[in-house]
Image (spheres, grey):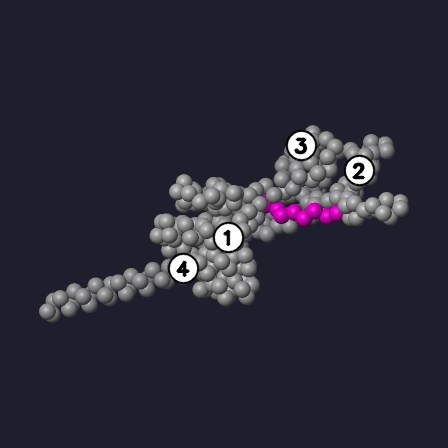
Amino acid sequence: KILDTGNDSGTEQWLCAGIHRDDRTSDEAIASRVSSENIESDNNNNQHDELGQQSTARELEAASTNCRRLGGGVRARALAADAVLSSAGYKTIAVAVMTKNQNNTTAHMRLIGLISMLDPPRLDTTATLFCLQRAGISVKMITGDHQNIARETARLIGLGDRILPQTELWPASATRDEMILHADGFAQTMPRDKREVVLVLQQRYKMVVGMTGDGVNDCAALSQAQVGIAVEGATEAAQNAADIVLTRPGLSAIYAACYESRLIFRRLRSYVLYRVAATIQIV
């Protein structure tokens, strides 16, 4: 779907991703289609060369209107398009080319467009999250992604909408610690921030914390948590920092481990109580 950025001086090539939602299910991945728009200011006529089949997403139509209202700034239009894509769960990369003047002395970058990428939740995440919550296990999302992306991901997997930015984690205070306890997640975090969340839950609220991760930026939090879990495909550094390494895709093994461990604990507890009672009876 083309984001209509309006007319501007010169000729610009804009590349951005369209969004198509299938309302029949929230678990299916969002499909993107790429289109291009040529803007010619000489005749004030727009020529469109579509690279993909157009979608009918209403949010892109609204973004198109907003882009036109913003007027002549390329930066403003790019930021508006990025905001729309990020709110739908897309990550974006800006593409630019270097141009020089006729004397080849002065070079500057000219924006070509935005390329969107989608990193959807794992297929079993929603079901696993539901089972963990029913088992009395609180789940929080800590990600380095933009806050808009984090909120959309939380919506897709059925997590709460209280996703806060990294800036809320500092400075440390009693109010901050309580906010960490009740938050559903944090976005735009650094490795230090992830470890801080784990530390607060452990030291302030005496919780047993499990942490999942797959990258080098998760190593500090994985090693700090009582149960560090490296997901399938994690880097070697994350696997070394973790206590458990998943070998199958998905997160369902985490709930299975919790379920089996509780069964084992109950059996051990029952056996200990029986032996104590039998010993007292004999004495």
Q: Which residue is drawn at 53% across and 49% down?
A: 189
Q: What element carries label 3?
A: helix
4 vs 2, front mark: 4
Q: What element carries label 1?
A: helix
Residue at the disc numbered 4? 226
Q: In which quarter of the image is the C terminus?
A: bottom left
Residue at the disc numbered 3? 66
Q: Which residue is drawn at 57% across and 42% down?
A: 148
Residue at the disc numbered 2? 39
Question: What is the distance, in whole Å, between disc 3 and disc 1 at their CAs?
Answer: 37 Å
Q: Which mark is residue 192?
A: 1
Q: What element carries label 2?
A: strand
Q: Which residue is drawn at 41% across and 50% down?
A: 200
Give, as a single range, the part of the protein colored magenta: 88-96
Q: Main secondary structure of the magenta part?
A: strand
Q: From the viewer's perspective, is 121 left or right of 1?
A: left
